[in-house]
Every structure is written in C-alpha cells, then in structure tokens.
Image (tube, rainbow, N blue to C red):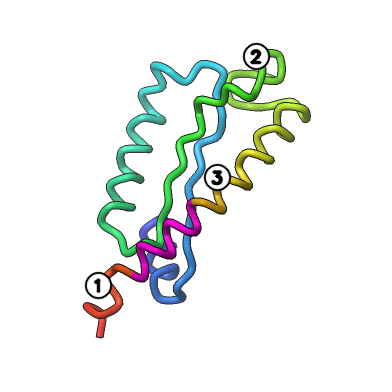
Amino acid sequence: MILELLEVARRREFPVIAVVGPQRESSGDVVTDLHLRWLSGLAAAGCGELGVLDMRNAPYVESGEYRDNSHLYSKGAAKFSARLATVIEDELKYLQAERSRSTCSQDAE
C-alpha cells in the first residue's frame, strides 16, 4: 500500500510525510524502530517524495498529558500539533530541495 502511494506521489509530484507521534516511553519500542528503519530506507531510495519524522521523544509534552504511552489528552495534543506544524514546514522545504536535486524525473523520461 505505501509503495503504491509513493508511486502516485512521484507521478503527481506531491510529498508524503510519515509521522511517528510522541510516546511517553519511546525507548525499547522494537516494532516502531523496525518500521522507522523501513520507512527511512524507502525515503533514502526515493526521489524526495517521502519524509519520515520520528517525533517519539517530545520533551515539550509533560507526562500527565499522555492518556497512555502513545495517546495524548487535548493539552498535550495541542502542544504536539503546534510543534508538528513547524517540523512539517521544515520537512516540506527539505523534500522540495531533494526533488529539485533528484535525477529521478530525468530517469523516468
């Protein structure tokens, strides 16, 4: 499914950003670590259409603002959303620069 999405993103020239949200205890999450490695490999092999944001470590969210390990109450969610907006803006700029440097579109011709 993700590979199909990335192919559509490449053809239509829009970015996809995978975000791993904050976790109260982010260390020792083997499954998320595996997913992030896989996504990072896809991003590295791509043409600037995939960004990966690992935002598990969120010192701006206090422990009491988590409902459980990976879900936030509204106050924590508001903090995360504000931070996410800035981080996504930076990531979009990075992906745009990657796409402009990429030879992928030339390879497709």
Give the amino acid type for the residue marked by disc 3 in the picture: Val
Proximity of marks 1 and 2: CB atoms separated by less than 8 Å: no
Going by the picture, which residue comes out furthest to the right?
Answer: 74
For the stretch drawn in magenta, the main secondary structure is helix
Q: Residue at x 56, y 53 (%)?
A: 89
**N-terminal of the two: label 1 or label 2?**
2
Closest to the observer, 42 or 59: 59
In which quadrant will I find the N terminus? bottom left
- Is 62 drawn above or below residue 10 in the view shown? above
Q: Residue at x 48, y 52 (%)?
A: 91
Going by the picture, which residue comes out furthest to the bottom?
Answer: 109
Would residue 3 appear left or right of 91 to someone viewing this image? left
The segment highlighted magenta reads 91-100
Q: Which mark is residue 63?
A: 2
Give percent across and percent down for residue 67. Answer: 69, 20
Within 10 Å of disc 3 (Cα), the crowding (few <14, some 14-19, many 20+) is few
Give percent across and percent down for residue 23. Answer: 55, 24
Q: Quadrant of residue 3?
A: bottom left
- Is 84 drawn above or below residue 64 in the view shown? below
Would residue 95 appear left or right of 86 to someone viewing this image? left
